[in-house]
Image (cartoon, rainbow, N blue to C red):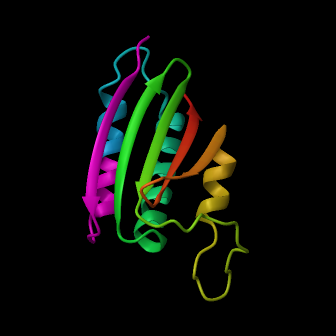
Amino acid sequence: MTTTSAERTAPRSLSAVAEARQAARAFLGALGQPAIGREQADTVVLVVSELVTNALRHGGGAYTLHFAAHPGTIEIVVQDPSPKLPRMRTPDLIDGTGGFGWHMVNDLAHQVVVTPRPEGGKTIRALLPR
């Protein structure tokens, strides 16, 4: 199988995360055979949602989302303009201020790589099973 990819760039908006989830579903739907299983698709959409939410909340409000399908792997790449790297934090069970998403992304993905970009900002690459 050859690599299939799609890309989306969006500024901060109330619907940006929903649009990113929709873009993930459209990308997965266009893959053809062998189709990705429902559980794997739900995991991809969840990771996209978390990464885009983090890019909007902590990364400067704009992001670029890129998808690629490789044999056995779905690659999700999110770039944002902030040089601040993600960090694990203790989830907040009282005030609801978060802390769950980065743990979840790292638990669901086979590999997560964060790379500072020379022009500023960072790239987060998550590889998930297909």
Q: Nearer the viewer, residue 82 or 15?
A: 82
Residue at x 66%, y 37% (from the top left corner): 110
Most extreme residue toward the right is: 90
Residue 86 drawn above or below residue 109: below
Q: Can the viewer see residue 109 in this picture?
A: no
Residue at x 49%, y 42% (from the top left corner): 44
* Horizontal arrangement in the rendering, residue 81 relative to residue 37 (left or right): left
Q: Nearer the viewer, residue 123 or 46?
A: 123
Query: Residue 104's image quarter?
Result: bottom right
Across and down, in percent, residue 128 comes to 57, 36
Magenta stretch, residue numbers:
1-22
Across and down, in percent, residue 17 comes to 35, 61
Counting the numbered discs, the total is: 0
User: Which quadrant of the figure contains the N terminus?
Assistant: top left
Whether residue 2 appears in magenta in the rendering, the answer is yes
Q: Can the viewer see residue 98 in this picture?
A: yes
Most extreme residue toward the bottom is: 95
Across and down, in percent, residue 95 comes to 61, 88
Query: Residue 86's image quarter?
Result: bottom right
Most extreme residue toward the front is: 118
* Horizontal arrangement in the rendering, residue 99 relative to residue 80 (left or right): right
Across and down, in percent, residue 10 comes to 26, 58
Q: Nearer the viewer, residue 68 or 30?
A: 68
Whether residue 60 appears in magenta in the rendering, the answer is no
User: Which quadrant of the figure contains the C terminus?
Assistant: top right
Residue at x 31%, y 58% (from the top left corner): 18
